[in-house]
Structure formats: structure tokens, C-alpha cells
Amino acid sequence: MHTTSSSHNNRSSLRRLLRQKRRQLSSYEQKVASYKACQRVSQQAWFLNASNLAVYMASDGELDPLPLALKAQKMGKRVYLPVLHPLNSNHLLFIRFTSKTPLHKNRFGILEPCLKGYGLERINSCKIQALDLLLMPLVGFDPHGGRLGMGGGFYDRTLAVKPNQFKRPKLIGLAHECQKVDQLSLEAWDVPLTGIVTPEEFYLPQ
């Protein structure tokens, strides 16, 4: 299934609109929203039972999962961050994140663990099928599990392994309520979310 130009344009304009809404939140509103959403996640059985989970470094007004990452580390869970794959274009690696992890900015200006001398050591990396929980950023979502990302397709490509080849981690999107739309038009390659957590709600598609 190929993207039609009108569908592509619709997604691009929706992406711009939702990013603008997200950026209009004050730093105080951002902090409160992140705290509430992280509290909501931390009470879920799938978080409590996860041994390996991946978060992301928030940018551009995204809901910040860092409080949750710190809580998970204190609970003895292994926390990972996505890193742009150096060879496999538009794919992600997942590298261990601790207080001692060396970080640098990637080409999008987002902090990620350094691969050289750290991330390339096998003990510090995690295959996606070994993750129990993947907390994902998004630009927009609908209550049915539809996710609109930044447009790079990094998560979709990384997750595009036939489901019968491995058990996917639980995919949970984190978002502000202002990022919700009634219905997203999805493409064949879009990977649906297991659920979406906002500061106000937990959306669990049927």
C-alpha cells in the first residue's frame, strides 16, 4: 500500500498542527503532565512486571518519560534508550541507560547513548524482542491505537518483523491529551499501539 499524495499532505499538515499545540504548553504544564502520566504508567501491571523497558529522550514538547526511567532504575529494572542505527538506515538500536551512560546528541539534536566504547559492547545493548515494554513518543494518536510519528518511520521499521518470528514488546504511546484525534488514516506499515497514556487517561484499544 503506497501513500497517496493527498494522504501524505494530510498527515504532514496534521503533524504540523499537533506539534504546534504541543509546543504551546508552558514548561510548568509540561512538568505536571509528565509527572501525572508517569504516575499513571507506574501503577500498571505491565510496568511493574517489566524487567527490560525502553524509554526515549523527550524533545519538541514531547511528554517526558525521564521520571519513569529513574523510578524503573530504582526498582532494579533495566532501562534502554533508542539510538539511530549507524548502518541500517531508519532503524533503531536499544542501548542501556544508567546514570553513568555517556550521551551525545544525534543528527536530530536528541540525546542518545554513545555507541563507541559503550553501546557497541554486547552487555549494554538489547534486542527489541527482549524488551518487555516500549514507551514511544508520538505526534498524534487516536483512541484505537493509531500513532502518528515524526515521519521518519524509525519505530515502524524497527518493529516490522513478522510477529510470528518473535513476541513484540508491549507498545505504549505517551502523549498530551491535546494530541488526540478521532481517527488517524493509517498506512499498511504503521504498527498499532497496545495503549496510549496521557496525564488524564489510559486508552486501551479493544
Image (cartoon, rainbow, N blue to C red):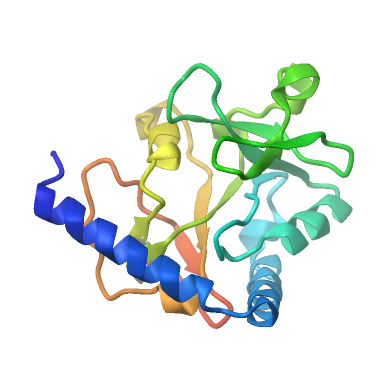
**Quarter containing the N terminus:** top left
- Residue in the image at 24% along x and 70% along y: 183
**Residue 206 in sight here:** no
79 left or right of 18? right
Q: Is residue 184 above or below residue 5?
A: below
Q: Nearer the viewer, residue 104 or 168?
A: 104
- Residue in the image at 49% along x and 51% along y: 171
- Residue in the image at 43% along x and 24% along y: 89
Percent x, y of residue 44? 64, 67
Percent x, y of residue 17? 34, 70
Q: Is residue 96 above or below residue 136?
A: above
Which image quadrant is residue 98 in?
A: top right
Q: Nearer the viewer, residue 176 or 131?
A: 176
**Residue 33 in sight here:** yes
**Quarter containing the C terminus:** bottom left
Q: Is residue 141 above or below residue 104?
A: below
Which image quadrant is residue 42 in?
A: bottom right
Which image quadrant is residue 148 in?
A: bottom left
77 left or right of 50? right
119 left or right of 150? right
67 left or right of 58? right
The image shows a total of numbered marks equal to 0
Percent x, y of residue 7? 15, 55
Percent x, y of residue 112? 68, 38
